[in-house]
Amino acid sequence: MPGQVHRERDILDLWERGVALDRWRREDALLAGHAPPRRLGARNTALLALRNAHFHGAWPILSTCPHCGIELEFTVDSAALLADLSADRDNGAVTIEWRGTRLAAHAPTVEDLRAAAMKEHPQAVARTLLAQCLEGLDADACDDDALEELGAQLEALDPAAIVQFDLTCPDCAHAWPALLDIGETLWAEVRNLAERTLLQVDALARAYGWSEAEVLALSPLRRAAYLQLAEAQ
Ligand SMILES: [Zn+2]
């Protein structure tokens, strides 16, 4: 099955590009060749398109019920999600009205997030992000309500930046919005498949002396059969 070989090699290549990097650099590396977008919504869309090019449509996602702690799996149709996200308009740079003044604003970029992530306290993170994105704002003077209100205005500039699903726990009926971190979830998917492939290559190389290319060229059925035989030895 040539498709299988191609896909595994592509996934191993993606894994190799990203494995030694922190998350933002890793995403840039995964998107290399596509001029990685800086704004979060466009970045989500590009990462999702990458996901759809390498994996099948149904995307299994795990979320933990914040009330009773059980973990549940739900499935996202990633082709439909990509269509949804692509339809969202990224408003880019605009002016927003805020308590009688006008502030030049831009939707958050990776660089803005990186600056905010240097802070430890959640409020300091929020203040830094707002100060990065809203020119002339005195973020230190903002109370909790102001932080929340401005945060919502910022989110509205780039709806595809935050992807969430309304879930209801089957055990305790608690409802919550589950955030889907597209970059991290895609990376987990790439890493899992790459590690599984590496383990299979390793097992068959040890048992039979085959090269990586030879193992990857086996059909899935033959590979599974050889893996069983090698294990039985
Ligand atoms: Zn629950």
Image (tube, rainbow, N blue to C red):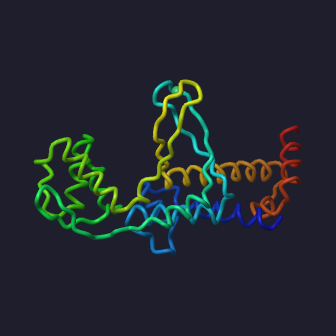
For the point 32% across and 70% down, which residue is it? Answer: 92
- 106 relative position to 193: left or right: left
**Image-quadrant location for residue 133:** bottom left
**Image-quadrant location for residue 219:** bottom right
For the point 78% across and 53% down, which residue is it? Answer: 205
Measured as percent of width and height from the top left, residue 3 is found at: 77, 66
Which of the two residues, 158 or 188, is positioned nearer the viewer here? 158
Measured as percent of width and height from the top left, residue 169 is found at: 55, 31
- 67 relative position to 204: left or right: left
Q: How many numbered circles are shown?
A: 0
- 59 relative position to 128: left or right: right
For the point 89% across and 48% down, which residue is it? Answer: 225
Does residue 20 lie above or below 75 as drawn? Answer: below
Query: Where is the C terminus found, in terms of image quarters?
Result: top right
For the point 50% across and 31% down, which residue is it? Answer: 65
Measured as percent of width and height from the top left, residue 113 is found at: 32, 56
Query: Where is the N terminus found, in terms of image quarters?
Result: bottom right
Measured as percent of width and height from the top left, residue 61 is found at: 58, 45
- 65 relative position to 198: left or right: left
Which of the two residues, 92 or 175, is positioned nearer the viewer here? 175
